[in-house]
Image (cartoon, coloured by chain):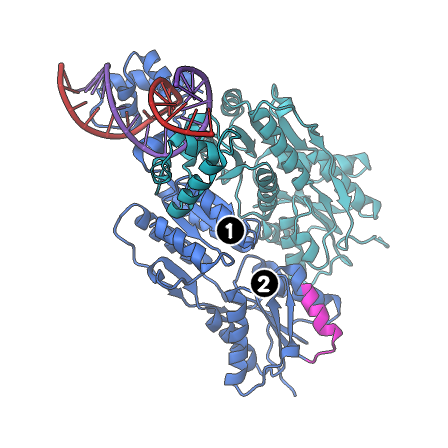
Chain colours: A blue, B cyan, C red, D purple
DNA sequence: CTGTTAGCGCGTTCAA
DNA sequence: TTGAACGCGCTAACAG
C-alpha cells in the first residue's frame, strides 16, 4: 500500500504539498495539483483513514448500533442512517447487540474505540448506568427508541403504548370483543408498553383484559406461529388478534391459515411497525406505522450535529404512530 | 476522551507499561496490572483503535461489501460474516454498493482506507479492471458470488445455472410443460445464468423456450408482482412459474392470489435462494437452496487467512445449489 | 520487569 | 506557494 511519502517522492514534492492537494487546500499551485494527482493515480494511492483521524483528531464516521442487521426492521433503520451518512460524506460503522446486554456494551465500545464522534444507539438491554457513562463520554451519542432520564434531548422514541392502544381500539371499533394478544417474550420496555396499550384500550372500552388471552413468543414469524398455536390449543375464544409486531403477525397469519381459519372473515389480525412484509403478505396486513426511517434520519442528523458541535436540527423526541388500514381486519357483524 | 498518557500519569507508570497490561503482555508485574487497571477503570479509558492500527500496521477488522444490508438475502450474509468476525475477535465494517458500479467502487475504497486487511466483496456492477487493481493491492480480498479470471483461488461462487436448471427440471418432472419465468431486470451475471439454466432445462427435455413467457422486474416482491401481472395481462398460458429469487416468488404468490389463481392447484411456483420468507409465505415456497451462510463463512475465513498470512482453510470455490421441496409446486394431473 | 525512544501515516503549524 | 518539523495515541524495540 502506497503512503503519502511514496506519492511525494514520485511527484517530487514534499508530503505537505501532497496533503494539500489531497484536502483541496486553496494554497496549492495548479502545477502541484497535476503532478500530485498523476503520482496518486500511478500508485493507486488510497489515504489511510486511521492516520488521518489521528492527525485531525476527528473522523468522518457515524456509528450505529442495532439489535441485528438481518432483522428487516433494523435493515430499514440501517439503510435510513446510511442514507444520511452518505449525504454528509460520512462512513457508517455498524454494530450488532444481538439482544444481549454484554454484546451491546461491547459493540458500543468498539464504535467508540474507532473514534466515532457521532453515535446512533438502539440498545434495550444494557443498563442505564452503563449507558449514562457512555453518554457522558461521547457528546454525539443519541439514543433511538429509549428514554434515558437526564438525556432527554438526546433521545428519540416512539409512543408504543399509544400505538398499541390505537390498534386495539380499531379492533374494538370493528365490533370485536374477544381480542387476543400475541406478545414478545423479550422483557424490554417496548413489549411492556405495547401490551399495556392493548390492556388500556380494552379497559377504556369496558372490556376486561384476560391474561389467558395473551400468548408469548420470540418477536419473529416463528414466535408468532408458536403463540398462535398455543392460543388455539387452549381453545381460547377470540375473533381478533393484536400483535407485538408485523413479523409475529405474519406468523399468526400463517398459523391461522394452516388451521383453516380465514383471515379476516373468521379472525382479524393487526400488526405493528409497518415493515416491508406487511405489504406482501396475504391478506395485506392492517397495522400500526412505526416511522423508522424518519426517526432514524433525525437521530442520525442530531448525532452528527452534536458530534461536530454544529447547530442542532429540529427534532421530534416523541413520535406518534398511526394506523395503516389494509385487509386483515374485518367488521364483526353478528354476536 | 482519556488517552494512554492520562492512564500512565494516574497510575504512576510509563505509557509502555500501560500498553503492556492493555495487551496482556507476559512481562508486566502483578502490581502494574492492578494499578493500571484501576486507573483505566477510573478514567473510563477506551483505547484508540486508529492509533493502535497505525502503530501495529494492522487492524483487527474485516470488511464486507454487499448490495444492500436491508435486503434479507444480504442480511443473512452480513450476519454470517459477523459471526466469524466475532469468533476471531475482529470488528466488521460494512459497505453498501446499492447496485451501482460507482458506489461499489467507492465503498470498497472506503473499506481499504480504513485499512481492512481482509475483505469479503459481493459486487456485481464494478468492472473487472477496477476489481483487478484492487485485488492486486489487497491480498486479503475475496470475491463472493463472482468469478474473476486470474483470481480463481480468491473467488467463491454458486452454480446459478445448475440451480435454475434443477428448479425447472423439477417442474417438468411434475408434468408441467408451460413454464413461465420471472426474471430479474438487473443485467448481472446471476440473472443471465439463472435464465440460461431455465432455458437449458426446457431444451434438455424437448420443450421450446419462448421469450414471451419471460417477464422482468426488480428482484423484489414488487417486481415479482409486476412481472406476474404483465404475464397475466398478456393472456399467456402457463401452469408453472420459475422465479429469479424468493422475493420475486413471494410477489408472484401474492399476485396470483389476488387474481384468484390457487397455488399450487392451478399454478405452481418455484423460487430461488431459500431465504427466510420462503418458510412463512403460504403456501410454503418450494425453492432452490443458496447456501449463503456457508459460503459467506468460508469467504470470511479465507479472507482472514489471506489477510494475515495464515495457512489457508479448505474452501469450496463452486457451491452446488439443492432443491428444497415445500408446498408451492403440484403435480399436473391432466392436460 | 520497567522506562525511553522512535516511528506508524497524516495534518498543520511556522518560516522561508 | 512550499517544505521541515512536530504531534496525534499507540506499539515495539532497546537499554537498563
Question: Foreground: A335 or B221?
Answer: A335
The reply, left or right, for residue B166 in relation to residue B90 is right
Is A235 covered by the magenta stretch? yes
- Mark 1 lies on a secondary structure that is helix
Quarter-of-image position of residue A5 = top left
The reply, left or right, for residue B208 in relation to residue B143 is right
The reply, left or right, for residue B264 in relation to residue A17 is right
Q: Which span of residues is magenta-colored?
A: A225-237
Quarter-of-image position of residue B207 = top right
Question: Foreground: A72 or B139?
Answer: B139
For disc 2, the chain is A
Prevailing secondary structure class for the magenta stretch in the rendered image: helix
Query: What residue is shown with label 2?
Result: A186
Residue displayed at 52% across by 85% down: A205
Query: What residue is shown with label 1?
Result: A104
Q: Position of residue A315 (x, y in %)?
A: 33, 59
Residue displayed at 43% across by 35% down: B49
Residue displayed at 67% across by 34% down: B193
Amino acid at each position: 500500500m502506497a503512503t503519502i511519502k511514496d506519492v511525494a517522492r514520485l511527484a517530487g514534492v514534499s508530503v505537505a504539498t501532497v496533503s494539500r492537494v489531497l484536502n483541496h487546500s486553496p494554497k496549492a499551485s495548479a502545477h502541484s495539483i497535476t503532478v500530485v494527482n498523476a503520482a496518486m493515480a500511478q500508485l493507486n494511492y488510497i489515504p489511510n483513514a486511521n492516520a488521518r483521524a489521528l492527525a485531525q483528531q476527528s473522523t468522518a464516521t457515524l456509528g450505529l448500533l442495532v439489535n441485528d442487521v438481518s432483522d428487516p426492521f433494523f435493515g430499514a433503520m440501517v439503510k435510513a442512517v446510511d442514507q444520511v451518512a452518505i449525504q454528509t460524506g460520512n462512513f457508517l460503522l455498524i454494530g450488532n447487540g444481538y439482544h444481549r446486554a454484554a454484546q451491546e456494551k461491547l459493540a458500543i465500545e468498539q464504535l467508540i474505540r474507532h473514534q466515532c464522534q457521532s453515535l446512533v444507539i438502539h440498545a434495550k438491554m444494557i443498563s442505564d448506568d452503563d449507558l449514562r457513562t457512555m453518554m457522558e463520554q461521547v457528546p454525539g451519542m443519541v439514543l433511538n427508541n429509549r428514554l434515558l432520564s437526564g438525556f432527554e434531548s438526546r433521545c428519540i422514541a416512539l409512543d408504543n403504548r399509544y400505538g398499541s392502544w390505537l390498534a386495539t381500539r380499531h379492533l374494538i371499533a370493528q365490533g370485536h370483543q374477544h381480542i387476543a394478544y400475541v406478545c414478545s417474550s423479550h422483557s424490554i420496555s417496548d413489549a411492556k408498553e405495547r401490551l399495556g396499550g392493548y390492556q388500556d384500550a380494552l379497559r377504556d372500552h369496558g372490556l376486561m383484559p384476560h391474561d389467558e388471552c395473551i400468548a408469548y413468543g420470540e418477536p419473529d414469524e416463528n414466535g408468532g406461529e408458536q403463540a398462535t398455536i398455543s392460543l388455539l390449543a387452549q381453545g381460547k375464544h377470540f375473533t381478533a388478534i393484536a400483535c407485538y409486531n408485523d413479523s409475529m403477525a405474519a406468523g399468526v397469519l400463517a398459523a391461522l391459515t394452516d388451521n383453516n381459519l380465514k383471515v379476516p372473515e373468521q379472525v382479524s389480525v393487526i400488526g405493528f411497525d409497518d415493515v416491508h412484509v406487511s405489504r406482501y403478505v396475504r391478506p395485506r396486513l392492517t397495522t400500526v406505522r412505526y416511522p423508522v426511517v424518519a426517526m432514524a434520519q433525525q437521530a442520525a442528523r442530531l448525532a452528527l450535529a452534536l458530534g461536530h458541535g454544529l447547530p442542532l436540527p429540529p427534532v421530534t423526541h416523541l413520535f406518534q404512530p398511526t394506523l395503516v388500514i389494509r385487509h386483515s381486519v374485518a367488521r364483526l357483524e353478528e354476536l
